[in-house]
Image: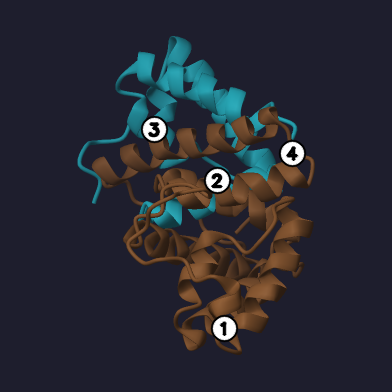
Amino acid sequence: MTTIRMVDPAAAAGPTKEIFDAVLRREAGVFGATSVSNIWRCMGHWPALLEANWNRSRALMQRGRFSPLQRELIATAVSIGNACTY
Amino acid sequence: MRLGVDAVGVTELMGVTEHTRALATAAAGLLLDSLDSERALVRPLDPGAAEDPARELLAEIADWAEGAMGRRGAPLLWRILAHNPHYIEATWRKDRALMSDGALSAHDKQRTALGVAMAIRGRYLIEYHAAILKHAGDTDRDLLEILGVVDHYTTLNTLSEGMQIESDIRPPA
């Protein structure tokens, strides 16, 4: 169970809403998401954290020379190693 | 899994991950901290002193290392495992079975293995897989791209575990 309440994207405003919208566009295209995923909703309580990590996500996961599959393989393998079930 | 990887591909990914973690544990347990480490917990065996089938395997591994890493001789980890012919044989055969082309390409597997080694700070395995990738033509920028994914997912894993976020991402039906 999540330790904090998650931000409702429908109630977000300003830069947080802009990032949530960008996250949803991205996730809808990559894996057919229909709502902002929980990891980003949790960061929404602190807009500076949300923005910094979204910028890093764009820089490191969307703008490299590797294929999306290659990056996803590494990401999944690292997450397994970190025992991260998310 | 997304991006068109089927159950076989996912299983290969799990295999590459556990194999890399196991080898990194073995290397760390042996106090191997680099490909040219001069001290280790167990003395590397001189290939000429090994008993068959370890001797034949070390010759096979040396051939592989020259082609895959551009290095002469079997890497230290294998020369140490050669003290136990059963250990080296089972582990080397597993390595070749898992790291060869399958549903995932051998190159993708090597990049994934380097990411795993970086994530667990396995110095020996970092050098080992980086040597293979560089010999295959990967550049410093490519290695940094792998590190970037490791770095970013360390962030996401830490947040999701720390906040105990339940996954809302489901596999396709």
C-alpha distance separating marks 2 and 3: 38 Å
Q: Are marks 3 and 4 on the same chain?
A: no
Q: Position of residue A34 (x, y in %)?
A: 57, 43
Mark 4 to mark 1: distance in Å?
29 Å
Secondary element under disc 4, as helix, strand or loop, is: loop
Q: Which chain's residue wears label 2?
A: B
**Up/down of B25 relative to A37, above or below:** below
Front of the two marks 2 and 4: 2
Residue under numbered circle 3: A41
Pick the residue in front: B160 or B80. B80
Element carrying mark 3: helix
Q: Residues within 10 Å of mark 2 (few under 14, many from 20)?
A: some
Res. B89 mark: 1
Gap in Å between the C-alphas at discs 3 and 4? 36 Å
The disc, 2 or 1, on the residue closer to the chain's N-terminal end is 1
Amino acid at the residue labelled 2:
Glu
Q: Give how far apart the Cα atoms at labels 2 and 1 are.
A: 22 Å
Q: Specify few, some or many for label 3: CA neighbours under 10 Å numbering under 14, 14-19, or 20 or more.
A: many
Residue that extends furthest to the front in the rendered view of this protein: B48
- Same chain for mark 2 and mark 3? The answer is no
